[in-house]
Image: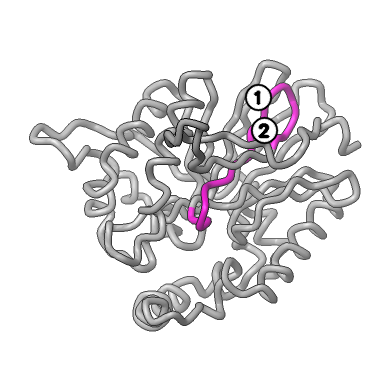
Amino acid sequence: MNYRRRLHRAFRDAPCLPLSEHSRYLLISDCHRGNGSSNDNFLKNQHLYAAALEYYERRGFTYIELGDGDELWENRSMRQIIEVHSHIFRILARFYRDGRFYSLYGNHDIVKKSPQAASWFAEDCSGAAPEPLFPGITFYSGLILRDDEQVKDIYVTHGHQTDFLNSTLWRCSRFLVRYLWGPAERLGFLDPTSAAKNNKRKRRTEEKLTQWAVEEGRILVTGHTHRPMIGTRDAPYCNTGSCVHPQGITCIEVCRRCLTLVKWSLSTRPDQSLFVAREVLAKPVCIDAYL
């Protein structure tokens, strides 16, 4: 099965959410929440992420996580990840209770597609009296924001489908990451199989995703490569970036039928106090511009 068929399959049974002038969606990918060890790449940005989520929660955004939310290749225990990042999962649980949280799976958390995966999120492991976190949650391979004006829909998925090793042969990749490249990363070596760490694989992945978006005439938003971007009319492919950048996290806001690339980082005021800053990285692009 080639990558085009894998991408089509990702959207075959995808739920559709309404996209209108009043819609507010937050698209974030590649959090890679870990177990709190030195290999937990999310750890350094967890407070930025929490501040961003609270900002979007107050403003009525619906949060869509595009995959690799949890690092389940390097780590075996989802319970341990929830315990370490319990404050994060409590915020996510509030979104979910309000009907404003949708979760897709990527290659690093592809095990979430199994029927028993929902049971991992049944309880909050952080308290003496466990309470449900995400009761009845379903993890999706793709999701469609359906434009109510029938101008242009937005197709959302993780993006690993272009890579045979990270999709079809994901068990082999997980083994290599868990027992070879994970330990090697601690010594300073980069995983050559990763689209996020290997520039050649990154470009190849982005070219395939762009080609699919052009051929299908669709706006496609993914994560996976960790390189944030907003597409153009000739190349309608966008990427949210990730939450493991050295100096912040990136995301895409979908508001008033426009896509805006945003960065959250730590900044200073003139009085030398620290604050979490929201920075618009690219001018908002309305979906009409993709016609």
Q: Which residue is the site of mark 1?
A: 18
Query: Helix, strand or loop at disc 2?
Result: strand
Q: Which residue is the site of mark 2?
A: 145
Q: Amino acid at mark 2?
A: Leu
Q: Residue at x 64, y 54 (%)?
A: 9
Query: Helix, strand or loop at disc 1?
Result: strand
Q: Which quadrant: the C terminus?
A: top right
Task: Tell whether 213 sits left or right of 241.
Answer: right
Q: Position of residue 47 (x, y in %)?
A: 38, 41
Tell which of 83 and 112 is nearer to you: 83
Task: Tell whether 83 sits left or right of 61.
Answer: left
Instruction: Give the Cα separation between the discs numbered 1 and 2.
Output: 6 Å
Circle 2 crowding by C-alpha within 10 Å: few under 14, some 14–19, many from 20: many
Circle 1 crowding by C-alpha within 10 Å: few under 14, some 14–19, many from 20: few
Magenta part of the chain = 244-260
| Circles 1 and 2: CB atoms closer than 8 Å | yes
